Amino acid sequence: MKILCAAVVLTLLLVAGLDAQRAATAVDPRLAQITLPAGSGADWRQWDSFFTNIVKKLASDLPESQRAQLQDLFLDSRYQLVQTLSVSPSDPVPSLFLDTWNRLSPILNQSMSALSPQVVGQYKGFITAMDSAASLTSLGQRFGLVQVTPDMLRGASKLLGTGDADPLAYVLDVDDSLRAFLGFTGAPSAPHVSPAIEEGALRPLGPGGARSASAALRSWFIAPAFAADDEFDRLNLWVPQAPEVNDYLSEVRKLLTQASTAALGKYKLAPQYQPLFRQVVFSAAWQESCWRQFVRKGEKLTPLASATGDVGMMQVNRQTWRGLYDLKGLSGDIEYNSNAGSEILLYYLSRYAIPKKEDKQPGGQLARATYSAYNGGPRALGRYRNPSTAPAWKKVDEAFWTKFRSVSSGKEMGVKSCYGS
């Protein structure tokens, strides 16, 4: 019986694939390989690269009215990818493909009337192919008989005209065009990663070993011979011991103040919101890491990292923000990490929480909305006030709110409680 059912399902899939193939080929013969995929499935890196390149191409063609929707979709897709990888041991690509296409298809159809005839032709072929592939994938997903293949993704990219470069190449470099698409100004400052960090070890600074090294680092902070531009580099080699916690947190406070000031210098924010933004930066850094970039494992210096790829003091996710920030800098430079996290927080505050009037919603609060989006993407903006939010996320949002209330009352140094004193 099981064999018979499988045979029936396979027959249905083949018939559906052939029907999709005929319909698509009537528009463009090149669509055949896309609508009836064969071979091994694409992995999640190939999917993410494909969609990133598709988004960059669409951003150059779509009218301004659809760009904001495309930005939301792109960021949500990155957060969804990380979440899916953390909970699903099976192939995540088919579900990611279907969820993303269900949101992207209406955006493209709404844009057609504003596009040039030449671009409309490209888009029609792309939409037809993707619709057919989505139908086939949806039918076969539950039986594991149909996969989203690299050939299918490359074929779709070619139809849309994304360029000659391999659209599935997983590139780690900072992409200026991707930053511009999302509205981030200019390239981020270059990180300063110490060779000692890249070697994974604390650099010995004296015969007393790690304790002497830490004491020497503390003296560097207060020595007038070091320029202000250099002082935060020393935090990259400092994992404080108990007697040093006050000095360490004082320096990190200066760093976070500088990071929030730098973000405000790049992006406009009405003066009445600026104090709140600074408080959000302090609170998020407390929530994410207790103001730590590194932890000590024996004599090894290790960047603070989560199982899902969040790194450093602001726990900026490597997969979510690939192409937007230097990944080595996020791990190895506390100043670079704090600047990136501050920029992202300001992005969610100024482009989402304030324009969407989160403070006017029942139970709404700008700081909480900003952090929920920072933690969960644009779709999570109102998560903190949604009664149906999962208990695990409610706990996260409540923990941030507790810290924010402490910071907003002038007690940001309460972060010291993380250090057991």
Image (cartoon, rainbow, N blue to C red):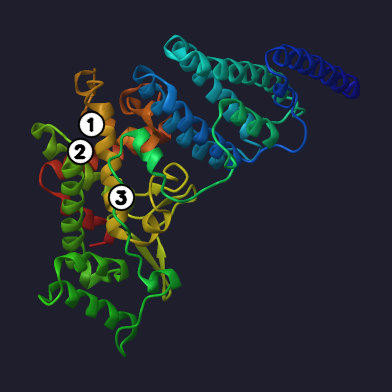
Q: Is residue 180 left or right of residue 95?
A: left
- In the rendered image of this protein, does residue 258 appear above or below residue 384? below
Q: Nearer the viewer, mark 1 or mark 2?
A: 2
Q: Amino acid at mark 1?
A: Ser
Where is mark 1, residue-wise? 350
Q: Secondary structure at mark 1?
A: helix
Residue 381 - label: none
Name the N-terminal-most of marks 2 and 3. 3
Q: Percent from the top left, x then y, of residue 215?
A: 23, 79
Name the N-terminal-most of marks 3 and 1. 3
Q: Amino acid at mark 2?
A: Tyr
Q: Percent from the top left, x then y, of residue 41?
A: 70, 37
Residue at 34% over, 83% down = 204
User: In which quadrant of the rendered image does the N terminus lie?
Assistant: top right
Quadrant location of residue 60? top left
Name the N-terminal-most of marks 1 and 2. 2
Q: Amino acid at mark 3?
A: Pro
- In the rendered image of this protein, does residue 130 appear above or below residue 273? above
The answer to whether the residue labelled 3 contacts the one labelled 1, judged by CB atoms less than 8 Å apart, is: no
Where is mark 3, residue-wise? 188
Residue 336: tell me if it is visible.
Answer: yes
The answer to whether the residue labelled 1 contacts the one labelled 2, judged by CB atoms less than 8 Å apart, is: yes
Q: Nearer the viewer, mark 3 or mark 1?
A: 3
Residue at 21% over, 44% down = 263
Where is mark 2, residue-wise? 267
Residue 406: tell me if it is visible.
Answer: no
Residue at 35% over, 70% down = 194
Residue at 22% over, 54% down = 415
